[in-house]
Amino acid sequence: MNFLTWGRNPWGQQVLTHVSWDLLWASLFAGLMFLVAHGSYMILSYRKRSSSETDALEAANKDLPTMITRHSFMARVFHWVQAAAMFTLLFTAFLPIVGVKFAWVQYHWIAGLVLTGSIIYHIIHASFFLDFWSIWVGPKDIPELRAELLRELGHEVPGPKAGKYPLAHRLYHVAIVVVGLASVITGILMMSRVRTPIFPRNPYLFSDVTWGFTYVLHGFAGVALIGLVIAHIYFAVRPEKWWITKSMIVGWVSRREYLEHHDPARWNVRRGKAQPAGRM
Amino acid sequence: MAVIRDMMPMFELFQPANVADAVSLLDRHGSEAWVLAGGMDTFDWLKDRTKRPNVVVDLSQIKELRGIKESGGGLEIGAMTPLTEVTRHPLVRERFGLLMEAARVVASPQIRNQGTLGGNISQDTRCWYYRSGWSCYRAGGNICYADTPTAINREHAILGADRCVAVSPSDTAPALIALDAHLVIRNARGERVVAAEDYFVGPALDITRMTALRPGDLLTAIRIPATWAGAQFYFEKVRDRNVWDFPLVNVAAAMKFSGPTIQGIRLAVGAVAAQPLRLTRVEAAVTGKPRNAETAELAGQLAIDGAVPLRYNGYKVPLMRNLVKRAIRGEQAATT
């Protein structure tokens, strides 16, 4: 299997042109294998945690509202706009490669611009109107990582629960930030090579070598997104994760879900009750 | 850049005697195989080492792919029928003079003797950046060298460009579209018939191919229905050298009249886009109108709507407009 494809420019130089589309199948295969492996593990080994601990917590926190806002309306709009743009980008990018031929370029860059706009909105929204650091990971999360791994291995661990976002969410967010920004930035640059009403066409913006790296980076990001999106959808539809997916649709989690999955000290909704829903 | 040599490169040569064997070979070797018809386009590609197939399937021994026969008032022309035979066949001359006119101006007599109708419509583009072996979009790369500020693009596209600005160089293709021809394609899974206008593929749909042929496919025949037999035809080709050359622009029209009124028309142009374009908007606009200068002017203006010239091919816009006007007026080389 090749990872890269090369070409020759008019000056006789060997230049990078793309990633090998074999990687598309590799990413698809890796995503599906992860899905099968995780699904099998969950069927064979998953132990639902005892409900007595949550019962006790719920009894002790009857002052909390029954519905706790997890995602504001605008945060949900961002998520679903981004999802629609991402699906459009992936389908328009890869369906022609697997043999479904259609005029894809215009749909692709339009979806790319929608995604870019939604990301810019998200950065501003998260920086100034949300708890910016709640989604990032750092050394402080090592105890949670250790506890999560031990729980996955079947141990009863009283260790720390998540803040607003579970550790897996935050790790996924880091991955999608890296891959998503790589694809968006390279994609915006690549728009100067096609005819659009947005940018004047300038194929000589960079040298052939730089363009080669730009295309390769865009390609790597694209195929990586296939695996990441498969994993995301898989976890979104898993029964034990459905409460999170539901919150991205309706915006709230129940008091019991909040107490079962979150550490009130790390995601303090009592303090948040005094704040507008958008800050939750 | 392409390496130009006199000697052919190494490849495995097959010369099947019938279509079934040819299809079987193409199925077995897939994208590794190259279909050789008359060789007029093939030998450049192979000698220049720009295309390097491992297997060449030579169709010259397949008799069933040659010849012209009547079929329901129309014609069925074998894909391997030489262009000269097309121009001389009495049924083509009598009923479909448009195809005769188009085939008659393809290249030179020697090339028409060797070149085939199937090969003429399936040939690759003449864009020299692409044919030089550089990694442009059409060759699987990430740039169109012909659509850069310093490119030599006098012969390139003014319509339908999508990253690639190469054009279809075929003269017979617009004529077959105007005649509503259908092309018969065989592969290991069976046979399919596609309309001529769908046979040609633009870069928006597939930037690496000019036709609907995929690995394993074999074009076996061209069917021309009786629908436009004996209609009024018009074909005109403008080229740099009248002795023999590829078109700068060509136009083909088939028209039926009710008195002075255009009752029906099919109109196609070549060498202005990556595929020969059927001008359906023009057809709709002129149908029911009298054949006069006013209608021709309307047709010419509509034809060039949306044209985007490159640095050196702006002349193609008025050229195309005027050829369409002449086709509607029926001056010059109108044939019946």
Image (cartoon, rainbow, N blue to C red):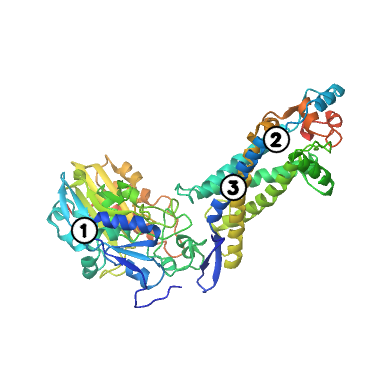
Q: Is residue B127 left or right of residue B68?
A: right
**Residue B196 tag number:** none
User: Which chain's residue wears label 3?
Assistant: A
Q: Nearer the viewer, mark 3 or mark 2?
A: 2
Tell me the chain of label 2.
Answer: A
Check the image and report above or below for A231 versus A65.
below
Q: Which mark is residue A226?
A: 3
Label 3 secondary element: helix
Q: Chain of mark 1?
A: B
Within-10-Å neighbours for mark 2: few <14, some 14–19, many 20+: some
C-alpha span from label 1 to label 2: 76 Å
Res. B293 in view: no
- Confirm whether circles 1 and 2 share one chain: no
Residue bearing mark 1: B101
Give residue A219's quadrant in the image: bottom right
The residues tagged by marks 3 and 2 sit, at their Cα atoms, a distance apart of 26 Å
| Residue A158 visible from this viewpoint | yes
Q: Position of residue A145 (x, y in %)?
A: 79, 44
Q: Amino acid at mark 3?
A: Ile
**Secondary structure state at the residue bearing disc 2:** loop
Which residue does the image show at 32% across and 58% down from the upper left?
B25
Q: Are marks 1 and 2 in contact (CB under 8 Å)?
A: no
Q: Real-space Cα distance between discs 3 and 1?
A: 53 Å
**What element does badge 1 sit on?**
helix
**Which numbered disc covers residue A46?**
2
For residue B62, side relative to residue B162 (left or right):
left
Neighbour class for label 3 at 10 Å: few (<14), some, many (≥20)? Answer: many
**Looking at numbered disc 1 in the image, what kind of residue is underneath it?**
Glu
- The kind of residue tagged 2 is Tyr
The one nearer the camera, A45 or B251, is: A45
